[in-house]
């Protein structure tokens, strides 16, 4: 367990889980329980489960019980991916962090790992016979000589 001192009392959260401060920033940005049927499980518990899965790389079925059903976490992850919730959260947090100078935008590319496939090495410089001749899509369309043709 990791202890974060915020305010007069220490808050205990698990490794990789949302702190109270992070949750206070994220909570207003999350979708509400607007659908009919059973209400959603607590967003914080589910997000912590999703963070555990992403951090460990384990299968969804191995999600610890403290985060609830793995199906719930998976369904919420997929639903929010489809409706753009994750993108909105990321954009908001990046904008806020960048405004106060917490983000350093630095890109580094190591050419030893940026490799092309072996077949990409010998690109054709001249057009092939098929390209010169013209393929199926490049043939001009012919008007039919049947009845009604102008």
Image: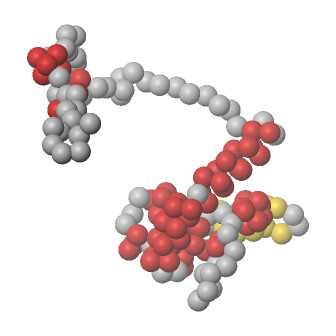
107 over 81 or under it: above or below = above
111 over 57 or under it: above or below = above
Q: Position of residue 71 (x, y in %)?
A: 44, 77
Q: Residue at horizontal 13%, vertical 19%? A: 133
Q: Position of residue 146 (x, y in %)?
A: 15, 43
Q: Nearer the viewer, residue 64 or 84?
A: 84
Q: Nearer the viewer, residue 16 or 75?
A: 75
Which corner quadrant of the image does residue 135 belong to? top left
**Residue 20 appears in the rendering:** no
Instruction: Name the residue at the left extreme.
Output: 129
Please state if 149 lies on the left or on the right of 66 as rendered: left
Please state if 134 lies on the left or on the right of 78 as rendered: left
Q: Residue at horizontal 61%, vertical 86%? A: 36
Name the image quarter holding the N terminus. bottom right
**Residue 46 appears in the rendering:** yes
Which corner quadrant of the image does residue 10 belong to? bottom right
Q: Nearer the viewer, residue 97 or 78?
A: 78
Name the image quarter holding the C terminus. top left
Q: Residue at horizontal 40%, vertical 69%? A: 60
Q: Position of residue 149 (x, y in %)?
A: 23, 40
14 over 103 or under it: above or below = below
Instruction: Name the residue at the bottom extreme.
Output: 37
Instruction: Name the residue at the top extreme.
Output: 126
55 over 30 or under it: above or below = above
Which corner quadrant of the image does residue 32 belong to? bottom right
Q: Residue at horizontal 62%, vertical 81%? A: 35
Q: Position of residue 98 (x, y in %)?
A: 75, 39
Count of marks placed on residues: 0
Please state if 112 lies on the left or on the right of 82 as rendered: left
């Amino acid at each position: 367990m990791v202890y974060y001192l915020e305010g007069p009392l220490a808050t205990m959260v698990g490794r990789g889980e949302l702190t109270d401060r992070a949750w206070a920033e994220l909570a207003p940005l999350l979708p509400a329980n607007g659908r009919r049927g059973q209400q959603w499980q607590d967003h914080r518990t589910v997000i912590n489960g999703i963070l555990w899965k992403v951090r460990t790389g384990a299968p969804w079925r191995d999600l610890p019980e403290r985060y609830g059903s793995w199906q719930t976490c998976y369904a919420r992850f997929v639903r929010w991916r489809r409706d753009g919730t994750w993108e909105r959260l990321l954009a908001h947090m990046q904008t806020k962090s960048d405004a106060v100078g917490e983000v350093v935008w630095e890109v580094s590319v190591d050419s030893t790992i940026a490799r092309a496939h072996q077949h990409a090495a010998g690109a054709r410089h001249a057009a092939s016979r098929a390209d010169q001749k013209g393929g199926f899509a490049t043939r001009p369309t012919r008007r039919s000589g049947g009845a009604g043709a102008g």
